[in-house]
Amino acid sequence: MAWHANSSSEMGKKRIVGAFVLVSFFYLFLLYLRRDVMASLKRIRRVLEEHPWQFIHEAHKPSGVKDVMGVPVQLRYSEGEELTGLLSVRSPLQRRRWPEGLDQGAWYAGKVWQAGDARTRGFGVLSVPGGGELMEVSSGTAVR
């Protein structure tokens, strides 16, 4: 009888340890999957620490352009200027979503790309007027 009680006690301990290991593994797996979100937020924070917000008059979504990392966009920094080259805009949580009202203007912080040229590396941050989500702007992933 004593052997049977020890056996079930040992089995219970093994189940507890197994459940703990499984929960720990699942938590680490979720952290691994979301590491890109943390890296994106870190880049956004760095840009906002270094660059002031400026209002841009237009964020244009070009038709027929694909972007694996986000939404393709061209920016017009001020009235009468040309649109920039192709840039990629993405939210840390929802990568391929185009926010309402972005084509009527937005707030931008970051490196100013030259009109018609987006080949230089760099990051910026874009936000719809009135608040909302912060979106990361980068060059080089949008293709026709």
Image (spheres, rainbow, N blue to C red):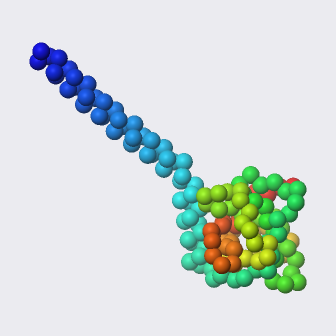
Q: How many marks?
A: 0
Q: In the displayed structure, would residue 22 be above or below residue 140?
A: above
Q: In the displayed structure, would residue 62 be above or below residue 23?
A: below
Q: Which of the two residues, 112 or 102, is positioned nearer the viewer here?
A: 102
Q: Residue at x 53, y 53 (%)?
A: 35
Q: In the displayed structure, would residue 4 be above or below residue 98?
A: above
Query: Position of 23 compared to 139: left or right?
Result: left
What percent of the width, then of the height, locates residue 117? 83, 70
Q: Quadrant of the N terminus?
A: top left
Query: Position of 13 compared to 40: left or right?
Result: left
Q: Residue at x 82, y 65 (%)?
A: 61
Q: In the displayed structure, would residue 57 be above or below residue 20?
A: below
Q: Residue at x 72, y 82 (%)?
A: 55
Res 18 quadrant in image: top left
Res 97 quadrant in image: bottom right
Res 19 quadrant in image: top left
Q: Is residue 50 visible?
A: yes
Q: Quadrant of the C terminus?
A: bottom right
Q: Residue at x 79, y 57 (%)?
A: 142
What percent of the width, then of the height, locates residue 42? 55, 65
What percent of the width, then of the height, locates residue 134? 63, 69
